[in-house]
Amino acid sequence: MIRAICCVPVSPLRAEPSHRSEMVSQLIFGECCEILEEGKDSWSKIRGSFDGYEGWCQSGQLTEIDEPEYDNGNALTPDWVSSLEYNGHPMMVPMGAVLTAMKNGRAHWRKNQVHFKGKTWEPSAAGRDAKSIRQLTYKFLNTPYLWGGKTVFGADCSGFVQSVFRFMNIPLLRDASQQATQGEAVGFLEETKTGDLAFFDNEEGKITHVGILLSPHEIIHSSVKVRIDKIDNMGIVRSDSFQRTHHLRIIKRILPEPQEAVRPKDR
């Protein structure tokens, strides 16, 4: 098995080995993967280590790493944009970049060297109380909707949700229909807590959308952009136009009991 790591700020993950192909997800700097197949024209089929999602990315946007470095550590960058050095050259990475195998601000991925001296976020110590969840989701507000995206510069509904929960050390699957299989069902909106997930279906009954409940009456989700709208037992009502946009199917509770929040620290 060939192990690799994303060595660019964001690498598009495509359904087929072509720039014209649908972007199904992304790899963010520092995310690890397994290379499943080497294709033509410098494309690699990979499986992400975090969520098991498969797709094609350009081989040059990955670099091979050794087993001791693979998935070693899960600290994230908490700022919208952070600066680091990669092989002595500056690189800007988005919020959520993974500081894999980092020790005292430095990492060595075979021949490649990473130097980072900014703030870090330890997901295992993140708060899961209502205030902490709101503060975390608000960092994504106004992020444009982007099919296959999962960063503050563009995210689809499930990519937004997955990224938020990663900051709380909760691994979620990639697509909304997959995420709907996780957690415990909540019977009524009145019984929900901040951080519960609401799933929505289309006319055929397929789960096509997901958002994070802020209260029994408010939801934050990616639709056109990451926004806060109203929700009732029928579904989502846009706060600006009062138009009904999504039909509520099921509510799931993913988070365990809340714990104390900690602030990001300097590395």
Image: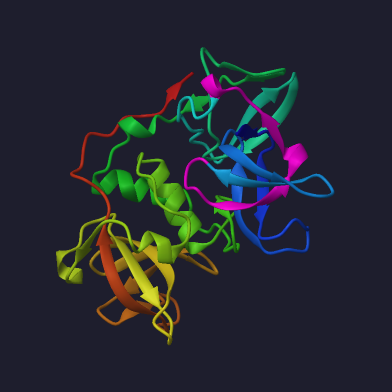
> Residue 241, relative to residue 83: is it above or below?
below
Residue 68 magenta-highlighted: yes
Q: Where residue 109 sits in the image (x, y, percent)? A: 64, 21
Scheme by which the image is coloured: rainbow
* Callout count: 0
Q: Identify the magenta region.
A: 49-69
Front in this rendered view, residue 114 or 121: 114
> Residue 262, relative to residue 34: is it above or below?
above
Tell which residue pokes out farthest to the top in this image. Answer: 104
Q: Where residue 79 sits in the image (x, y, percent)? A: 52, 37
Q: Quadrant of the rendered structure where residue 221 is?
A: bottom left
Split into 4 quadrants, where in the image is the N terminus?
top right
Q: Where residue 192 sits in the image (x, y, percent)? A: 20, 62
Front in this rendered view, residue 37 or 19: 37
Image point 77% across, 49% down: which residue? 39
Q: Quadrant of the rendered structure where residue 36 is?
A: top right
Residue 141 appearing in the image = no
Front in this rendered view, residue 38 or 212: 38
Tell which residue pokes out farthest to the front in this image. Answer: 1
Image point 78% across, 58% down: which residue? 19
Tell which residue pokes out farthest to the right in this image. Answer: 41
Q: Where residue 107 sits in the image (x, y, percent)? A: 59, 18
User: Along the horizontal axis of the image, is 24 left or right of 219?
Assistant: right
Residue 206 magenta-highlighted: no
Image point 48% across, 63% down: which residue? 157
